[in-house]
Every structure is written in C-alpha cells, then in structure tokens.
Amino acid sequence: MTQLPVLNLSSTATGTTSDGRRASLPPRHLADLDLAGRRAAVAELGEQAFRAGQVSAHYFGRLIRDPAEMTDLPARSRAAITEALLPPLLHPVRELATDNGTTRKTLWRLHDGSLVESVLMGYPDRVTVCVSSQAGCGMACPFCATGQAGLTRNLSTAEIVDQVVWFAGQAARGALPGCPDRLSRVVFMGMGEPLANYNRVIAAVRRLTEPAPEGLGLSQRHITVSTVGLVPAIRRLTQEGLSVTLALSLHAPDDDLRDTLVPVNQRWKVAEVLDAAFEYAARTGRRVSIEYAMIRDVNDHPWRADLLGRLLSGRLAHVNLIPLNPTPGSKWDASPKPVEREFVRRLRAAGVATTVRDTRGREIDGACGQLAASSGGKVGERQDGLLARRANEETQ
C-alpha cells in the first residue's frame, strides 16, 4: 500500500464544506459545455472560435490538463482560455494503492472544500474508474456510511468528468502495471445517488461518450449508472436513447426488509422499481445489473434467494452479489461463504445469471461499500462514507 501526504482537513457536514463554508458549485469548465458552447465561450473572450477545439483536443484527446503543455495556443490566448474554461476542479488530498498498484483510490478536495473519492481499477483486459456524482448522499441506507452522513451537494458535470479524465491520464502514463494504457469503462457507483443528480450525470455520460474533441470517446455500453430505485428518473433514463448499463441496488426482494435497507423503497416499492428497470431493459436491450449486498442473517435467507429468483426469472437481468465489507461501527457482517454459495445456487437454479464480486481493495478501504471521504486518520477510520460498488461484472 502506498499513501500520499494528507492535508489537514476535517470531514464534511451536510450542506457545508470541510472548513465550515457553505457548499457551492465550481466555476464553469469546458466539460460543462458541448463543443458549440465552448466555441461561444471562447468567442466571448475575443478569441477565434477554433481555439475551443484546440483546447478540447488537449483535454479530451491528449488528456493534457497543464496549460503550459498546450503549445499550439498562443501564450496570450492560452492564458485567457484556460483561465475561463479550465479552472482546477479536483485537488488530490490522498492516494492509496494496493493490488500491486492496480487498484488506486484517490480522495479529492473540491473548490469549496467538499470531499469525494473515486477508485481506478486495472485488470489485464480493461481499466475501470468508479466515480462519485455527489458529495455525500441523501438516500440514508443504514449499511452505508455515506448515506448516514447525509448530502453535502451535487457535483457539477465537469467535476464528474474530470475524475474520469484525470484517471484516464494516469492509465495512459502507465500507472497500472500489467494493465492496458487506455481507460475503457466508467461506473457511476461512487459517492451519491447518480439519478438524484440527473441532469449533470446524463450530461457527463454524453461528454464521456462523445468522440474527441467533443468528449472522451468511450462506448456507452461501457458506462454503468447505478440507482437505489428512483422510479421517475429510471423512466426518464429509458427515454434518453442511451445504451448504458443500469445497475439497480436492490439488496432485498421483499418490501418489509427493503423499506429498512433502502429507505426510498417506502416511496417506490420493489414491484414498481423492478417494473421500471425491466422497461429500461426492454427499450435498450441492455441487461439490468441487480446489486445485492449479502448481509449475515439479514437478507441472506434461502427463501429470499427463492423470492428474488422468481422476481427475476425470464427477465433481462443479472445479479451481482456483494459480500458486505466491514465499515466502522456497523452492526452487520458479511454472510458466511456456505450461505453465500447456497444463495447463488438457488438463484442459478431459477435461471438467473449470478456472480459474486471479489473483495479486491480491502487493504485501502477500496472494496465495495468501504470508500470514505475522510481526510485524516488511518485507513479504516471515516466519518463520511460512500456506497461505492466496484465494477468487475457490471459492464459486461
């Protein structure tokens, strides 16, 4: 494990930043704008519109963030354009690495002191980044420390995109030994509920999938957007004409338990949430990923496996079972392996494709459910938390 220096920041509180100031969105960044918007912004500066394409090509195409390296722009133009369209958004506070350097977790301080985390994961055949869409989370899931901390604010489109561009640059520079040098997959499974920041998340998806210099040029099919089940937003996503993977954090197949584990279920029940997810699958042809954290003696009973199997049988769905990873102060633990195996057996017997996610990254609190936007203390200590799910199978 490696660790960068830690800045002296305290954890964020709901609606306020790490230093007690009111949270606020950052200044405009080129990633907030489409190419036409960037050209208009450059023209407002008295510069020729084509300069917008040049700076966009550096940022999205060459993954260059340092204005000094944008030498095809005249110095005067470079200074004006970068000041207006490339304000610094992410300030690394701490980076931890494990798995021989192929799993890297970064804590960011944003312009207003808000703290978020994201994770870069390298595999022999792909590189994936797990990004945050909010600082904190307002969904209040009791097994997620982030949900207990509450919501500080939504991230801007550019703050989301900038996490990806930053890590794409790391991969391109060979930061992940034995892995490809091109980032290929993005999962919106970090801090926050992506569909609660709907407009900015969808704008970020479009920016990430448009070809350079408009965007980063990733495949829509290699983008996963998670949700705890905001039904109106799922239905809205169905109409977007996108082919991203939808990941539904279900965690219980029955309303009695899901009302507790995922409080938004008190508004939209299991049947309605699944109907919306299946509508998305039918419209897009994309298999829905059903996320299910295995919690000892809470949701791992054989009858719940059978019920989940009945709900998903014959549907375009895939279950990702997530062994619950330890978090400070939690009263819950992971299901024993024999219980987990029986759960898998019952789902597969019902004809439901099922996988169990690995626990890679535990050493740096980078496994599923372990990330924390806390600036101080040893690994494992957190006040903010983050229901961040890792992406091993979601983007298949």
Image (cartoon, grey):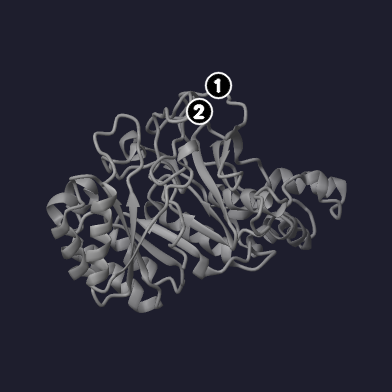
Amino acid type, callout 2:
Ser
Q: Residue furthest front?
A: 338
**From this viewpoint, is residue 120 visible?**
yes
Structural distance between the alpha carbons of marks 1 and 2: 7 Å
Between residues 9 and 35, which one lies in front from this camera angle?
9
Give the residue number, with chain letter if any, for mark 2. Answer: 375
Give how far across and how far down residue 48 sits, in percent: 80, 59
> As shown in the figure, which amino acid type bears the numbered disc 1?
Asn
Q: Residue at x 73, y 46 (%)?
A: 82
Measuring 60% from the left and 57% from the top, which residue is drawn there? 33
Callouts 1 and 2 close, C-beta under 8 Å: yes
Occupied quadrant, residue 343? bottom left
- Which is more toward the observer, 369 or 353? 353
User: Residue 22: where, in percent of width, then height?
Assistant: 45, 30
- For label 1, the crowd category at 10 Å Cα-Cα, with few meaning under 14, some 14 to 19 and many 20 or more, is few
Looking at the rendered structure, the secondary structure element under dot 2 is: loop
Name the residue located 50 percent from the left edge and 28 percent from the top edge: 375
